[in-house]
Amino acid sequence: MRRVLRISTVLVVPLSMVLLTGVGTAAGKVKPEVTKATHFVYTADAAETIGQDAFINNSASNDKPDALLFVTPQYTPDGVCGCVVEQYALGIGYLGAPINQWVAFREDENNLPVGESFDVLVVPSSSASAFVQIATDSNIVNGDTTLINSPLTNGKPKAVIQVTQNYTPEEVNNPHTVGVVYDTAVKEWGIFNEDGAALPIGAAFNVLVGSAESNGGKTMLVKATSADESGAHNSVFFSNKKTNGQPNNVTFNTQVYNPDGKGAALNNTETGVYYDGSKSEEAVFNENDTLPPLGEGFNLLVFSS
């Protein structure tokens, strides 16, 4: 099984790296338990990038298999151009003992580029607004969509939802770019494969509804319009006081097929975020260097730093 193969690969990591997985300080003191959501920017260097995996070495997530992680590719960590792009579907997964760390990885199992940066949100535990959605026979519709049945989202086309693929619960890969869609017929939100491929039974997703569990984030919906798009950057710029003039901002993004339950725009490519110093604004962009389609929506969760 893939899990066994991945752990066996990790075991060749130098012992010095494995020792970094602990949360104790040099003085031997244990850091306080993280009880609220934590966000940060993480860049995996050569020692932390192995095959398809980028190890997320942080005390907020190490040794926490029950945490819910959300990741968005970040092109300009802390406002500096890392200039690393990842055009393929990403997920996260937890590796148990002796590693005890979360990794961000390519769902197609090909090598992840060294130096990839991610905006990471760690929610310590599940709740009504932060949970894992697992695709089952009973909730998959149209072959490519798993419907979310929650009072926080049912009948609410303006709900702002963040989604990250999670390999761990059922150990199922879904090597496809995903987005969210509001099904106006049943009045439920769904997670779907942007390319229309069948969603495998057991595919799992971390879901965050709104900002209540984010510990200080602000949600917003951005739509790709001719006024906001930049063909030169293949980007959709947005204005927000938490990101304008804030190169250290941390922003999370999930694609929306029909923002507010209206329209329809497919965007079958991974998206990331970056800060444009010349405009002093943050932007969402297509990692494959194409322009997002007009009408495409982006659910954002933003932090000033």
Image (cartoon, grey):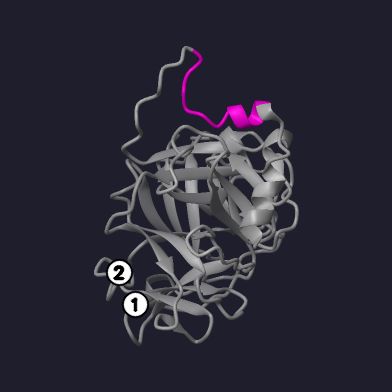
Which residue occupies the extreme top position in the image?
27
Judging from the image, what secondary structure is the residue with disc 2 in?
Answer: loop
Residue 235 x/y as whole percent: 61, 56
Apparent side of residue 271 relative to residue 295 in the rendered image (left or right)? right
Task: Tell me if mark 2 has few (under 14), some (14-19) or many (20+) residues whose alpha carbon lies within 10 angstroms of its own.
Answer: many
> Where is residue 162 drawn, in percent x and y?
43, 58
Name the quadrant of the N terminus: bottom right
Magenta-tinted stretch? 16-26
Name the residue carrying label 2: 153
Vertical side of 69 occupied by 128: above or below: below
Relative depth, front residue between 177 and 11: 11
Which numbered marker is on residue 188? Answer: 1
Classify 72 as above or below 108.
above
Q: Secondary structure at mark 1?
A: strand
Residue at 43% across, 37% down: 304
Residue at left 55%, top 76%? Answer: 200
Indicate yes or no whether the magenta region holds residue 24.
Answer: yes
Report whether 210 appears left or right of 135: left
C-alpha separation, residue under disc 1 versus residue under disc 2: 7 Å
Three-letter amino acid code at the position of disc 2: Thr
Q: Compared to 76, does 229 lie above or below? A: below
Disc 1 + disc 2, Cβ < 8 Å: yes
Secondary structure that dominates the magenta span: loop
Number of numbered tags placed on the structure image = 2
The three-letter amino acid code for the residue at tag 1 is Glu
Q: Residue at x 40, y 76 (%)?
A: 147
Query: 56 or 15: which is nearer to us?
Result: 15
* Quadrant holding the C terminus: top left
Residue 277 in view of the camera: no
